[in-house]
Image (cartoon, helix red, strand yellow):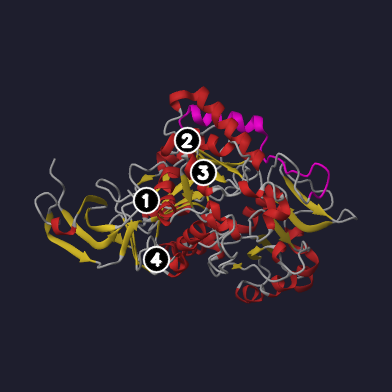
Amino acid sequence: MAQAAAELVLASRNVFTGEGDGARPAAIGIAGDRICWVCAPKDAGTSAFPLRADAEVRDLGGAFIMPGFHDAHLHFFHSALYASPLAERFVGASEQDCVARLAPLATRRPAGGWLLAQGWREYLWQPACMPSKASLDEAYPDRPVAMYSGDAHTLWLNSCALAELGLGPSSQPPAGGAYERDEHGELTGIVRETAAMELMPRIMGTFSEDELLDAYRSFMADLNAHGVTAVCDTALAATPGLDFVRDDLFERLDAAGQLTVRTHLFPTLLPGTSRLAELEARLHSPMLRACGFKQFFDGVSSQHTAWLREPYANARFDGDRGRPTVEPADMTKMVREAATAGKRVRIHAIGDEAIHQALDIFEHAQKNAGERLHGSGPGGARGMEHLENFQPGDIARLARLGVVASVQPRHITLDPGGPERDLGEARVPYMWPFRSLLDAGATLAFGTDSPVTGIDPLAAVYTAVTRKDADTRQPEGGWLPAERITAAEALRAYTLGSAAAAGRIHELGTLAPGKLADLTVLARNPLTCDPEDIPAIEVQATYVGGEQVY
């Protein structure tokens, strides 16, 4: 069959197609939004690799051309919001420092309106301690304040916010959540897990649709500037209607031709598959798809809400080992129903018991759904998110079951000393075991969990390759250095692996004829440069569907 004639050609001495571990000289022909051929530069324009008469040929010299970065797991709404003038994002050095950092937001937002910020991590403060409403009340007694934690699992509210939300001494949290109280039974202002997530839509309701659309456009431009061409927007909460997967905003942008990031939606898994079916029927453009479900099985280790087999090393009470956010029997039923309908399912599982039981559930669904559980193995009908702490035998089992491991490398260095503190030395060797997972035959899909960590893919690649933080370059020698992976493996996880998580390996993830022309151009070759130089590599250009968007 004759090749299609290219209307745009990108050529370089360093092209990483995703197939193999190195870069080579190549020319990539693009027709419409697809790659029509890939060949040696000298062969471009021959009868085997034809050009249109008006074709543009761009010789990029030694620039590194690769498949576009695909963030396999982020939360678009909150990422866009906290990167916009509507809110603030910071960690802060202490409780009082966090309160002080709200001042610019208070100045620019309407008087009396909500002040919303995200990013505080009490375990990084000196001294480490949980905040309370008192410090916020002193600074802002007459306007509601909501401070979302860096891990996006805990809210810190002031008294005005509690009143605005109707929370008082008799309030009871939803299943899987908590309203913390002091020794007198009074609310402290700390709200955890599903209870926190349940409150967020009411807080977010103060922003107009036009404000949010502006935030979405700005965030997409930032993603493109970092070489990101596609994302998976995953549900933020286990509770019905609270996932913040805003298909309405994406649909408006897509209709206006303003989507510059290929977007894959993963709303909350609930009994029945009607929402996903409705989204699938409505959203079928090349830029916007509903691709499956996501559900939460536990919380996070730093707050002792991740579900462990044995208690935390620094247990706060007898039997302190977290708990499931959804009862296993209910999760089993929902996953089986989705599998029978041939729908993709991704489960948030951080603690070793959550991972173990999620694998049990997937294995049970596979046996019962049989061929209807389509896309297993590298295609990614089943995925698990975060995967922080394994029981030893579950690494190989995950690979055998064909479950895509959707992981975020920068999580490794978020809390120096935290794994040892919370889980103890015996469990540490089985944390974020990227090398072991790949050696077992698993598919890794990389992302950022933004806004939990920043959106820069090269920072995440650096951490996967060195097991060090991209900002501090610590710890010396890397944390669990035996679990380092190569730069080629990290790039594949951020491209083809993420395409597997989205169920689009037939269209995305490598530079091959017939695939969508989503490409990133870097100034240097991350496969051959000193790993310490990876975070500083410049993104020179980003293409989505053959169109240069950066």
Query: Residue 75, position in %: x, y?
Result: 53, 54
Name the one closer to the observer, 343 or 473. Answer: 473
Query: Residue 164, position in %: x, y?
Result: 73, 59
Q: CA distance from mark 1 to mark 3?
A: 31 Å
**What element does badge 4 sit on?**
loop
Question: Viewed as shown, does residue 328 lie left or right of 265?
Answer: right
Name the one closer to the observer, 228 or 523. Answer: 523
Q: Which residue is mark 1?
A: 287
Q: CA distance from mark 3 to mark 2?
A: 11 Å
User: How packed is label 1: few (under 14 Cα within 10 Å), some, or many (20 or more)?
Assistant: many
Name the one closer to the observer, 342 or 174. Answer: 342
Tell me whether circle 3 and circle 2 mark residues in contact (CB < 8 Å).
no
Instruction: Name the kind of residue labelled 3 in the image.
Output: Leu
Q: CA distance from mark 4 to mark 2?
A: 33 Å
Sequence order check, earlier mark of 1 and 4 = 1
Q: Which residue is mark 2?
A: 402
Question: Viewed as shown, does residue 111 lie left or right of 295?
Answer: right
Q: Which residue is mark 4?
A: 529
Q: Which residue is mark 3?
A: 437
Query: Residue 83, position in %: x, y?
Result: 53, 66
Tell me whether circle 4 and circle 3 mark residues in contact (CB < 8 Å).
no
Instruction: Name the kind of residue labelled 4 in the image.
Output: Cys
Q: Quarter of the image containing the N terminus?
A: top left
Tell me whether circle 2 and circle 1 mark residues in contact (CB < 8 Å).
no
Q: On residue 273, which mark appears?
A: none
| Residue range highlighted in magenta | 315-343
Sequence order check, earlier mark of 1 and 3 = 1
Question: Viewed as shown, does residue 385 lie left or right of 31?
Answer: right
Sequence order check, earlier mark of 2 and 1 = 1
Q: Name the residue: 49% across, 24% down.
A: 369
Q: Which residue extends farthest right?
A: 184
